[in-house]
Image: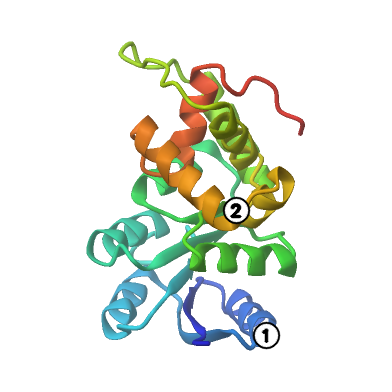
């Protein structure tokens, strides 16, 4: 089994050292490069053809994390980007989602959540921490749905899956809860995104909130 090749980037050396120490304990993860500023991240990405993921802070010298995310995703959409930030603010999260970030967790997250996010992204599943998801949902609740929005008919099973995705459950967790195979859940997920004509989980959750499919949250 090949390792997950990761570039870590933060403007604080102590954070980088902590990440290296933490991730070095996981044999399936290989840190192939590190950077202290956004320009260096972009240079390294170009020189690392087998790179799988970038773990990135928002506040970066020279080029900030939002712009770095945009540039990487425009040229290397297959590279997964996990934002690791101290900020749980709507404007940052929204801008990064729109820029193409695949995941967002807070710096006070524990090792299990960091590893869970890395593995989710490696499987092609986005990952947003629970507090971040709560902020996203609050943001969507404040938005007025576009005038042309219409409700797309989803099956009861698809509605169940949408609600569980909104609760930040992974494909494996959804499969276990609904007594389905992970392949079946993946198929439902792809069909739902296609039906709703959205690109990612954030778009799915926005639709679900604005159409009333999701009304109450147990936070």
Between the residue at mark 2 and the residue at mark 1, the CA separation in whole angstroms equals 29 Å
Residue in front for this viewpoint, 47 or 198: 198
**Label 2's element?**
helix
Q: Along the horizontal axis of the image, is 201 left or right of 110?
A: left
> Disc 2 or 1, which lies upstream in sequence?
1
Residue 106 position, x and y percent, is: 64, 55
Which residue lies at the image location 28% right of the left edge and 67% below the top edge? 76
Q: Along the horizontal axis of the image, is 135 left or right of 53?
A: right
Residue 175 position, x and y percent, is: 65, 51
Note whether 81 is above or below 153 in the view shown.
Answer: below
Q: Can residue 36 be seen in this view?
A: yes
Residue 81's quadrant in the figure?
Answer: bottom left
Which residue lies at the image location 34% right of the left edge and 63% below the top edge? 63
Task: Please give the label number shown on residue 171.
Answer: 2
Residue 71 position, x and y percent, is: 27, 61
Residue 44's quadrant in the figure?
Answer: bottom left
Which residue lies at the image location 37% right of the left edge and 15% below the top edge? 150
Task: Please give the label number shown on residue 21.
Answer: 1
Residue 67's quadrant in the figure?
Answer: bottom left
Residue in front for this viewpoint, 195 or 168: 195
Q: Can residue 60 be seen in this view?
A: no
Which residue lies at the image location 64% right of the left edge and 45% below the top edge? 168
Color scheme of the displayed model: rainbow
Of all residues, the one furthest to the top in this rendering is: 147
**Label 1's element?**
helix
Note whether 90 is above or below 26 in the view shown.
Answer: above
Residue in front for this viewpoint, 219 or 119: 119
Q: Along the horizontal axis of the image, is 134 left or right of 197?
A: right
Question: Quick one: quadrant of the C terminus?
Answer: top right
Circle 2 packing at 10 Å, graded few (<14), some (14-19), many (20+), is: many
């Amino acid at each position: 089994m090949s390792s997950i090749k990761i570039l870590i980037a933060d403007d604080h050396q102590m954070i980088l050292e902590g990440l290296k120490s933490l991730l070095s304990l996981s044999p399936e993860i290989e840190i192939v490069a590190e950077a202290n500023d956004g320009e260096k991240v972009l240079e390294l990405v170009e020189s690392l053809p087998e790179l799988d993921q970038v773990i990135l802070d928002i506040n970066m010298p020279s080029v900030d994390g939002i712009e770095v995310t945009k540039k990487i995703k425009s040229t290397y959409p297959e590279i997964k980007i996990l934002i690791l930030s101290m900020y749980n603010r709507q404007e940052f999260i929204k801008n990064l989602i729109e820029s193409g970030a695949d995941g967002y967790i807070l710096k006070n997250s524990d090792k299990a959540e960091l590893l869970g996010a890395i593995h989710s992204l490696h499987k092609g599943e986005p990952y947003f921490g629970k507090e971040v998801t709560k902020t996203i949902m609050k943001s969507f609740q404040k938005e007025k749905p576009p005038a042309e929005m219409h409700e797309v008919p989803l099956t009861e099973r698809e509605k169940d899956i949408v609600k569980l995705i909104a609760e930040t459950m992974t494909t494996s967790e959804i499969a276990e809860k609904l007594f389905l195979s992970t392949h079946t859940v993946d198929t439902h997920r792809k069909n739902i995104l296609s039906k709703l004509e959205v690109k990612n989980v954030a778009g799915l959750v926005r639709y679900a909130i604005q159409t009333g499919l999701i009304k109450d949250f147990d936070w």
